[in-house]
């Protein structure tokens, strides 16, 4: 019974923790402009992250080695360093977006300008990383993130034509007023939002923080195969809500308030309060994860002691990295760049960095020296290779599409 | 010397023909004990025409998945061969020199 | 002891994580030292650690700069990179295990510097939050 509760907790945490500022903004934006005609991209992204998170979690549980340790070991120091720089920059960009998101969420809740919240958000994020236990950090914000279920409630209350919604998902039809490059640009964005690189670093490093062994593989898999898809469903709910409320009035999403608007219309004030709680939990939780990931990646490349499972004085360089990443992110947001814009760029660049991260994981998950008998099965390998192809295409197409469509104008 | 000074170094046969670069150094744990373990002694060179680094582990003769990656890596590194260390006449110059003739590395290898 | 076992330096030893007796992470195998024995065979004598070891492996200008800067900052210029003699290695598997701690091996001066000048000054640094 206790084990079942543990698994349930893990699944719930995974659901609530799945959505971050990138998912919220991109899905709302796309829902308002394209309806559910791009839902396939979100679904594909969710499948991809399930596949690769399972692999990286299995590698961490069986071999005790986290992702970036293995990136350098497999690719060599030179290619590994290029990989590290690219992945770290993207993760730092995502961290910046999340800090901005936290500040925007507080602005929505209090009407105090977001810039005043930014340093506070940075300090709070850093303090939690510094002092709060890893399992508490994970579980608390993951569970609070379940508040975003209010978007599902909103969709239900809006009484949509369910058959019609399903039809849009399975038979996508690009809206006539949008052109194909823009359509695919946002497909890449949704993909990047669902499969952000930091998630695999964090999942594998988190597994080691929580001392996973082979016995925990069942729990890890439940988190991934139940939690992530249901979390993806929340993303789709955000898109559907935007479609139902914003699209008929041609309202485009450019602020966090507009993301919450459908909930205000469908569920009222209480719904908005719940949505705000969800926003804060999701962005704060993701800020913790990306901040930690900035430290994880560099430390694991160089072989430095990392993690919250040791005293900070034993992992001094790791904690300095997290501190520097936090200061940098706060500084960037304080330049008054629009956090929504930062978010939009972060998901596109995430898509560009994906093959770098996923390729070594696929290789290592097949290596019997690390995995023993737990190497990939043929199905996993087939799917893994197919997805590697897809992310490679998305990565190559991302920048040209961004330039051609002027970032989705 | 350091392993990095040998890895990536050009390899030439007795006639001076370049036959590839050193991609790895095979060692056997057959030396006298050094601390807890028997000493590792270099007993062969792995060379390949391709300059990209490690073969990602696909050179170990097992059928390690995924199949497509294995096929690509093998193709890039076709012509990879193992040369016994006894055949090395010199390794401290600008190239590793072998004491046998290999001729150009052919694709069929 | 695993006598007669074969391994490839690049594949099995280089860039592997070095782990201490308390399961604490020490460093990475940045390079490996080879010395000829009486019969002329090259023997793996030590693991080399740090920017002076890793720099040359990064290749090109970046590698040369890294090594040059590290040389400038080094306390003892002639000593070469930090060295972990193979006699402290107990196992070569998915990680390389050694019987000394990171502090004993003295291969991470940056960690010590950061600890002393930054982390120690922040309240709460002495206790793990786990």
Image (cartoon, coloured by chain):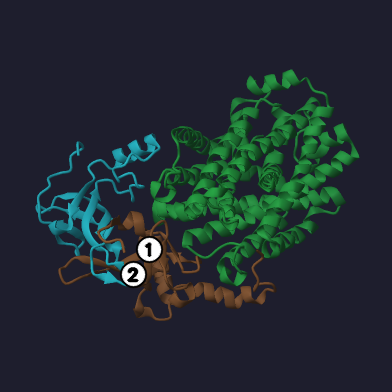
Chain colours: A green, B cyan, C brown
Say above or below: C120 vs A260: below
Q: Residue at x 62, y 64 (%)?
A: A324
Q: Is residue C43 left or right of residue A40?
A: left
Say above or below: B18 vs A36: below
Check disc 1 and report the residue beneath it: C91
Instruction: Tell me, for residue B103, which label it has, or none.
Output: none
On the image, which quarter does residue C47 sit in? bottom left
SS at badge 1: strand
Instruction: Tell me, for residue B36, which label it has, or none.
Output: 2
Q: Is residue C92 left or right of residue A266?
A: left
Q: Is residue A47 left or right of residue A331?
A: left
Q: Residue at x 79, y 43 (%)?
A: A147
From the top left corner, tell me how far across and down residue A290 is, in percent. 63, 53
Q: Nearer the viewer, residue B91 or A178?
A: B91
Quadrant housing the N terminus of chain A? top right
- Kindly give the residue lying farthest to the front in the view shown: A1
Q: Chain of mark 1?
A: C
Q: Nearer the viewer, residue C65 or A285?
A: A285
Q: Is residue A225 left or right of residue A300?
A: right
The CA span between labels 1 and 2 is: 8 Å
Q: Residue at x 51, y 46 (%)?
A: A58
Whether residues under marks 1 and 2 lie with C-beta atoms below 8 angstroms apart, the answer is: yes
From the top left corner, tell me how far across and down residue A234 is, in percent. 72, 36
Q: Chain of mark 2?
A: B
Mark 1 Cα within 10 Å, few/some/many (few <14, many 20+)? some
Q: Residue at x 58, y 32 (%)?
A: A44
């Amino acid at each position: 019974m206790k084990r079942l509760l543990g698994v349930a907790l893990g699944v719930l945490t995974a659901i609530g923790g799945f959505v971050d500022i990138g998912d919220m903004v991109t899905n709302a934006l796309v829902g308002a402009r394209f309806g559910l005609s791009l839902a396939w991209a979100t679904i594909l992204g969710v499948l991809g992250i399930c596949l690769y998170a399972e692999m990286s979690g299995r590698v961490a549980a069986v071999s005790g080695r986290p992702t970036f340790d293995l990136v350098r070991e497999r690719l060599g120091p030179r290619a590994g360093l290029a990989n590290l720089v690219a992945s770290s920059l993207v993760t730092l960009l995502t961290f910046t977006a999340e800090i901005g998101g936290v500040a925007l969420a507080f602005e929505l809740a209090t009407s105090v300008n977001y810039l005043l919240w930014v340093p506070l958000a940075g300090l709070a994020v850093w303090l939690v990383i510094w002092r709060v236990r890893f399992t508490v950090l994970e579980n608390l914000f993951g569970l609070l993130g379940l508040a975003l279920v209010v978007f599902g409630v909103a969709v239900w209350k809006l009484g949509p034509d369910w058959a019609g919604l399903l039809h849009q998902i399975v038979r996508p039809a690009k809206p006539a007023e949008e052109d194909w490059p823009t359509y695919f640009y946002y497909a890449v964005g949704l993909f990047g939002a669902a499969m952000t690189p930091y998630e695999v670093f964090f999942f594998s490093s988190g597994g080691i923080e929580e001392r996973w062994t082979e016995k925990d593989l069942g729990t890890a898999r439940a988190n991934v195969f139940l939690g992530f898809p249901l979390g993806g469903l929340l993303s789709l709910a955000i898109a559907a809500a935007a479609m139902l409320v914003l699209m008929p009035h041609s309202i485009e999403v450019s602020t966090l308030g507009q993301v919450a608007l459908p909930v205000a219309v469908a569920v009222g004030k209480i719904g908005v309060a719940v949505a705000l709680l969800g926003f804060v939990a999701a962005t704060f939780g993701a800020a913790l994860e990306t901040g930690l990931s900035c430290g994880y990646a560099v430390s694991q490349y160089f072989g430095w002691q990392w993690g919250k499972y040791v005293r900070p004085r034993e992992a001094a360089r790791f904690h300095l990295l997290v501190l520097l990443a936090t200061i940098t992110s706060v500084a960037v947001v304080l330049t008054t760049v629009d956090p929504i814009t930062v978010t939009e760029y972060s998901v596109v660049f995430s898509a560009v960095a994906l093959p770098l991260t996923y390729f070594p994981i696929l290789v290592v998950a097949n290596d019997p020296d690390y995995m023993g008998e737990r190497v990939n099965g043929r199905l996993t390998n087939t799917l893994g290779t197919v997805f590697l192809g897809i992310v490679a295409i998305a990565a190559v197409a991302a920048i040209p599409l961004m330039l051609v469509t002027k970032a989705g104008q | 010397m350091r392993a990095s000074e040998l890895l990536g170094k050009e390899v030439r046969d007795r006639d001076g023909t370049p036959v590839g670069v050193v991609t790895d150094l095979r060692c056997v744990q057959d030396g006298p004990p050094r601390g807890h373990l028997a000493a590792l002694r270099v007993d062969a060179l792995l060379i390949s025409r391709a300059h990209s680094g490690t073969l990602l582990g696909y050179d170990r003769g097992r059928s390690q998945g995924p199949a497509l990656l294995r096929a690509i890596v093998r193709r890039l590194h076709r012509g990879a061969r193992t040369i016994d260390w006894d055949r090395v006449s010199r390794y401290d110059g600008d190239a590793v020199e072998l004491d046998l003739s290999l001729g150009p590395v052919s694709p069929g290898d | 002891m695993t006598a007669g076992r074969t391994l490839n330096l690049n594949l099995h030893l280089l860039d592997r994580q070095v782990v201490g007796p308390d399961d604490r992470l020490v460093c990475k195998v940045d390079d490996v030292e080879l010395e000829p024995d009486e019969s002329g065979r090259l023997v793996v004598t030590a693991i080399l650690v740090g920017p002076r070891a890793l720099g040359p492996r990064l290749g090109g200008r970046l590698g040369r700069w890294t090594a040059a800067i590290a040389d400038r900052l080094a306390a003892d210029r002639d000593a070469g990179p930090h060295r972990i003699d193979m006699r402290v290695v107990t196992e070569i598997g998915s990680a390389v295990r050694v019987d000394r701690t990171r502090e004993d091996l003295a291969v991470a001066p940056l960690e010590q510097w950061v600890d002393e000048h930054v982390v120690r000054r922040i309240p709460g640094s002495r206790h793990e939050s786990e």
